[in-house]
Amino acid sequence: MLFRQAIDEFLLYLQIEKNYSLNTVDGYAYDLRCFENFLIQHGYSVQLHDITKTHVRRFIQHQITKENVKNTVSKKI
């Protein structure tokens, strides 16, 4: 399964099953798509089963050092 498909299914779950507000779902969508873009830009696979904890750690590191988003890192995690 592609990461994008998993994102879409997760967002639908948040909307339908959890009844999250549109703003909350949009926030999750933005963060997950940032992660997807990071994977693509760095040449990593976007197959869900290929994504590891190391990829997530590198994304967080990238966000802190390159994007200067220290105040929102806990939300992204």
Image (spheres, rainbow, N blue to C red):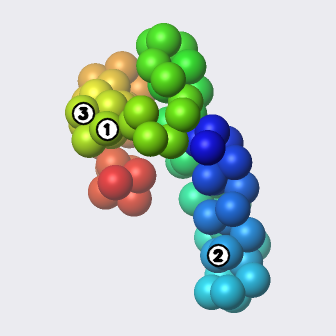
- Which residue corresponds to mark 1? 52
Q: Position of residue 22 (x, y in %)?
A: 75, 72
Residue 38 shown left or right of residue 62 in the figure: right
Q: Secondary structure at mark 3?
A: helix
- Which residue corresponds to mark 2? 14
Residue 63 shown left or right of residue 16 in the figure: left
> Which of the pair 28/12 is nearer the observer?
12
Q: Secondary structure at mark 1?
A: loop
Mark sitting on residue 41: none
Q: Residue at x 54, y 47 (%)?
A: 31
- In the image, what residue type sits under mark 3? Thr
In the displayed structure, 6 sits above or below 38; it is below
Alpha carbon distance from label 3 to label 1? 5 Å
Packing grade of label 2 (10 A; few <14, some 14-19, many >=20) is some
**Residues under numbered marks 3 and 1 in contact, where contact means CB atoms less than 8 Å apart:** yes
- In the image, what residue type sits under mark 2? Leu
Alpha carbon distance from label 2 to label 3? 26 Å
User: Which one is earlier in the sequence, the residue at label 2 or at label 3?
Assistant: 2
Q: Residue at x 61, y 43 (%)?
A: 1
Q: Position of residue 28 (x, y in %)?
A: 58, 59
> Which of the pair 10/72 is nearer the observer?
10
Packing grade of label 1 (10 A; few <14, some 14-19, many >=20) is few
In the displayed structure, 61 sits above or below 27; it is above
User: Which one is earlier in the sequence, the residue at label 1 or at label 2?
Assistant: 2
Q: Residue at x 69, y 62 (%)?
A: 9
> Which of the pair 4/69 is nearer the observer?
4
Q: Quadrant of residue 66?
A: top left
- Which residue corresponds to mark 3? 54
Residue 49 shown left or right of residue 53 in the figure: right
